[in-house]
Amino acid sequence: MLPQRNNDAACAGAATGRAWLLSLVLAALSIVGCTGYQVGPYAMYRSDVRTIHVPIARNDTFRHDLGVRLTEAVIREIERRTPYKVTGDPTADSTLTMRFLTETKRVLTETSGDDPRALDAVVSVQAAWIDRQGQVLMQNQLLPDNSLAFTFSQNGRLVPEAGQSIETELQDAIEDLASRIVSQMEIRW
């Protein structure tokens, strides 16, 4: 009689396993049938855009290399985080234009000899992401209607006495700006 119980338990376990497998297959088929949904790390990005043209950022400041440095940082972020391919072709699916508006330094504290002890470096950039038809792709509820560009500001603190330089702080600010700009390329829910 003991073998009969093990056999019944095995049959019940097999039936439960088959039912679980069947429900798993049905769930997978229902997901595959829904083509309007995206799954995976790129689900937060537009599916109608594949390529982005990123011209060198225009620079309205006296530091001549900021536009090139920002453009390189943004391209690295796009290639690293998004499904989009950056291309040099101006007829790409979309174009991301950027413009450095300001770059300033503010003295926070001074020594008794009026040497700066701590400074804030502040940069601001305007960015617009537009598709081939002229539709604005980078959108936010905080932007006024008919506004085509976001303005991003970033600041960084440096202490020259500790060996920090304005160039390294500006590079950190540029990388933070690039990350924030690419974050705005995500689809808003």
Image (tube, rainbow, N blue to C red):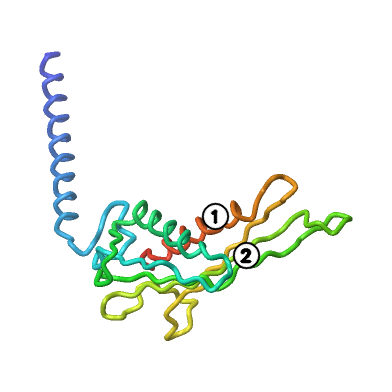
Residue position marked by numbered label 2 in the rendering: 122
Q: Quadrant of residue 54?
A: bottom left
Location of residue 146 in the rendering, given as x and y in whole percent from the top left corner: 42, 86
Location of residue 26 in the rendering, given as x and y in whole percent from the top left corner: 14, 49
Q: As drawn, is 46 to the left or to the right of 163?
A: left
The outermost residue toward the top is 2
Q: Which amino acid type is shown beneath numbered disc 1?
A: Gln
Residue in front for this viewpoint, 135 or 127:
127
Quadrant occupied by the C terminus: bottom left
Whole-number angstrom distance, CA of label 1 to CA of label 2: 12 Å
Q: Earlier in the sequence, mark 1 or mark 2?
A: 2
Report the disc number at residue 171: 1
Whether tag 1 and tag 2 are in contact, CB under 8 A, the answer is no
User: Residue at 14% across / 58% down in the picture?
Assistant: 33
- Secondary structure category for the residue under label 2: strand
User: Residue at 14% across / 24% down in the picture?
Assistant: 10
Q: Residues within 10 Å of mark 1 (few under 14, many from 20)?
A: some
User: Residue at 41% across / 61% down in the picture?
Assistant: 182
Q: Residues within 10 Å of mark 2 (few under 14, many from 20)?
A: some
Location of residue 94 in the rendering, given as x and y in whole percent from the top left corner: 29, 71
Report the disc number at residue 47: none
